[in-house]
Image (spheres, rainbow, N blue to C red):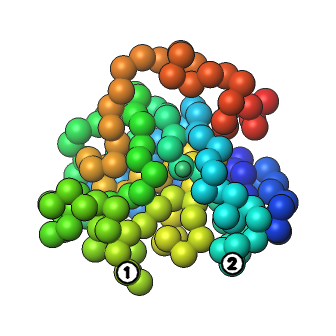
């Protein structure tokens, strides 16, 4: 699959990498239809984070679920979803209190995790054809409409990168 990856300070590149896959029964695999280009990406782009070359950028995506693990209950292949920036388990003590940005399960080194961000866990970003979404019941939010509708202008984000 194609991704947008950090290459060096102020250099990004479209790269071919192995497809994202389901890795746990609570995962969903989402085919991305658009992804924000976010100001927080600039911290890595400008060299302020120690990002490693190959880090895949991207969060705040829209997409369509392609596969789900056997434990996923709330989305199915074909469900259009939006995915929050940070990823979280949905059931730890902090998630249960609504503090999911400080989830205690999503990153072994400390609270909180995010897609495509240096120091925020091993999760590849969403400026990509496919995104693995852990704890899909917590992290996939069904939305109405169709890919390419007014929620995702064709000239911005990942579709623009794909051309
Ligand atoms: Zn952002
Ligand atoms: Zn949690």
Looking at the image, which residue is at 70% across and 73% down?
48
Near-viewer residue (160 or 132): 160
Return the x and y of residue 118 as percentages of the image width and height: 59, 71
Q: Is residue 44 left or right of residue 20?
A: right
Question: Which quarter of the frame holds ligand 2?
Answer: bottom left
Circle on res. 110: 1
Please report whichever mark, 2 or 1, sits nearer to the chain's N-terminal start: 2
Asked which secondary structure carries label 1, the reply is: loop
Q: Which residue is mark 2?
A: 50
Disc 1 under 8 Å from ligand 2? The reply is no
Q: Residues within 10 Å of mark 2 (few under 14, many from 20)?
A: some
Q: Is residue 58 above or below residue 8?
A: above
Return the x and y of residue 109 as percentages of the image width and height: 41, 84
- Cα gap from disc 2 to disc 1, whole angstroms: 18 Å
Looking at the image, which residue is at 68% across and 30% down?
156
Looking at the image, which residue is at 15% across and 69% down?
93
Q: Is residue 6 left or right of residue 147?
A: right
**Where on the picture, by quarter, is residue 50?**
bottom right
């Amino acid at each position: 699959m194609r991704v947008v990856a950090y290459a060096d300070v102020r250099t990004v590149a479209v790269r071919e990498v192995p497809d994202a896959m389901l890795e746990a029964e609570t995962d969903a695999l989402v085919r991305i239809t658009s992804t924000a280009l976010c100001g927080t990406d600039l911290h890595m782009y400008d060299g302020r984070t120690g990002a490693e070359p190959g880090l895949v950028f991207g969060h705040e995506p829209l997409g369509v679920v392609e596969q789900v693990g056997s434990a996923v209950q709330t989305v199915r292949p074909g469900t259009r979803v939006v995915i929050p920036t940070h990823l979280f388990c949905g059931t730890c003590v902090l998630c249960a209190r609504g503090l999911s940005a400080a989830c205690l399960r999503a990153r072994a080194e400390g609270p909180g995790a995010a897609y495509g961000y240096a120091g925020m866990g091993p999760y590849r970003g969403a400026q990509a054809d496919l995104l693995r979404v852990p704890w899909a019941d917590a992290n996939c939010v069904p939305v109405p409409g169709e890919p390419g509708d007014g929620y995702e202008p064709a000239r911005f984000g990942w579709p623009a990168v794909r051309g």
